[in-house]
Image (cartoon, rainbow, N blue to C red):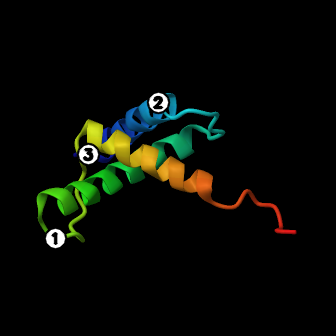
Amino acid sequence: MGLLAFVVFGLLVGLVARALMPGMQRMGIVATVVLGIVGSLVGGLLASLVYGGHPLDLHAAGIVGSVLGAMLVMFLIALGPRGRAAV
């Protein structure tokens, strides 16, 4: 897959994941593309763990797996600290 196609795929996956995830996500176009690409890799990792194969094999998942991976990444980011010091 060419680099441009991978970026467009990441953008589409990121947009779909952001639309399906409840709440407001404040991120720009670049962060949405990165979210889609990382979600594709996370979805591929989870698919390799479920269906067998070496867990360190990085490959792109299908659209559904990529969207689920991106939603998982957004969920994990939302659990993290908000940038405020703990009191």
Q: Earlier in the sequence, mark 1 or mark 2?
A: 2
Residue depicted at x 42% and y 46% = 70
Mark 3–mark 2 distance (CA, rounded to whole Å): 27 Å
Q: Position of residue 86 (x, y in %)?
A: 82, 68
Q: Nearer the viewer, residue 47 or 36?
A: 47
Looking at the rendered structure, the kind of residue marked 3 is: Gly
Q: Is residue 2 left or right of residue 86?
A: left
Looking at the rendered structure, the kind of residue marked 2 is: Leu
> Which label was assigned to residue 20?
2
Residue of label 3: 2
Q: Is residue 18 above or below residue 85?
A: above
> Which label was assigned to residue 3?
none
Q: Specify the farthest residue to the right.
A: 87
Residue depicted at x 36% and y 39% = 67
* Contact flag, marks 3 and 2 (Cβ < 8 Å): no
Q: Is residue 13 left or right of residue 5?
A: right
Q: Position of residue 17 (x, y in %)?
A: 44, 36
Mark 3: which secondary structure? loop
* Contact flag, marks 3 and 1 (Cβ < 8 Å): no
Residue depicted at x 32% and y 44% = 66
Q: Position of residue 83 (x, y in %)?
A: 76, 60
Image quarter where the C terminus lies is: bottom right
Q: Is residue 46 above or below residue 66?
A: below
Residue of label 1: 54
Q: Nearer the viewer, residue 6 or 53?
A: 53
Residue depicted at x 28% and y 43% = 65
Q: Is residue 13 left or right of residue 81?
A: left
